[in-house]
């Protein structure tokens, strides 16, 4: 900033830094949304894995209740089975054997946990970038104030 060509461009430098700060805020918002989605996805996948393991151990028909909507349950008898249907997303459901379903859910749990770690690392990096950008903005502003005060004192 101490270069003579930057004397009249302090506002432009501050605008660039403010633009960077805004980009970091936008990226943080998206990463927090992704983190929230992953944090809810992992327990859901683990619950599905628990149900599949329970179905694998069942040798007799058993009674259960299905949630149709909030506060509405339906009773059902579930026969022993070797196949389950899994929602894959985007309104897609596929039938798997219990072993294939376990493998798929294990892979999905591992992928979700890995992605969650990466998102946390990215958020830590962004926080460092916030701090660096804010410090740079403060330094540029303070430098400009000192420069103006020195120019004002020199003109008197």
Image: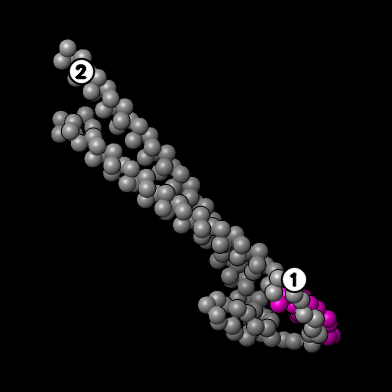
Query: Marks 2 and 1: in contact by CB < 8 Å?
Result: no
Rendering quarter of residue 73:
bottom right
Give the mark toward the camera: 1 or 2.
1
Residue furthest front in the image: 71
x and y percent of residue 45 in the render? 64, 69
Query: Mark 1 or 2 closer to N-term?
Result: 1
Residue 117: which disc? none
Rendering quarter of residue 87:
bottom right
**Residue that appears at 15% across and 30% down:** 4
Q: Which residues are magenta?
A: 54-68
Q: Is residue 39 magenta?
A: no
Closest to the observer, 30 or 84: 30
x and y percent of residue 102 in the render? 66, 76
* Residue where numbered disc 1 is placed: 71
Q: Quadrant of the N terminus?
A: top left
Q: Quadrant of the C terminus?
A: top left
Q: CA distance from mark 1 to mark 2?
A: 73 Å
Residue 152: which disc? 2
Closest to the observer, 156 or 82: 156
Colouring used for the render: one colour
Q: How many marks?
A: 2
Q: For this view, does 102 lie left or right of residue 63? A: left
Is residue 52 visible in the rendered image? The answer is no
Q: Is residue 151 above or below residue 73?
A: above
Q: Is residue 154 above or below residue 69?
A: above
x and y percent of residue 127 in the render? 46, 44
């Amino acid at each position: 900033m101490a270069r003579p060509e930057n004397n009249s461009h302090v506002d432009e430098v501050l605008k660039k830094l403010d633009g960077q700060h805004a980009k970091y805020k936008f990226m943080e918002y998206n990463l927090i949304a992704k983190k929230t989605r992953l944090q809810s996805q992992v327990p859901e996948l683990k619950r599905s894995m628990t149900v599949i393991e329970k179905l694998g151990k069942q040798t007799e028909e058993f009674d259960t209740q299905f949630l149709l909507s909030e506060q509405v349950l339906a009773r059902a008898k579930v026969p022993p089975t070797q196949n389950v249907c899994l929602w894959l997303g985007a309104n897609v459901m596929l039938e798997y054997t219990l072993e294939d379903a376990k493998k798929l859910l294990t892979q999905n749990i591992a992928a979700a946990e890995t992605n969650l770690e990466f998102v946390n690392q990215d958020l830590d990096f962004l926080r460092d970038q916030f701090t660096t950008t804010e410090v740079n903005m403060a330094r540029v502003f303070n430098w400009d104030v000192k420069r103006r005060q020195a120019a004002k004192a020199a003109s008197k």
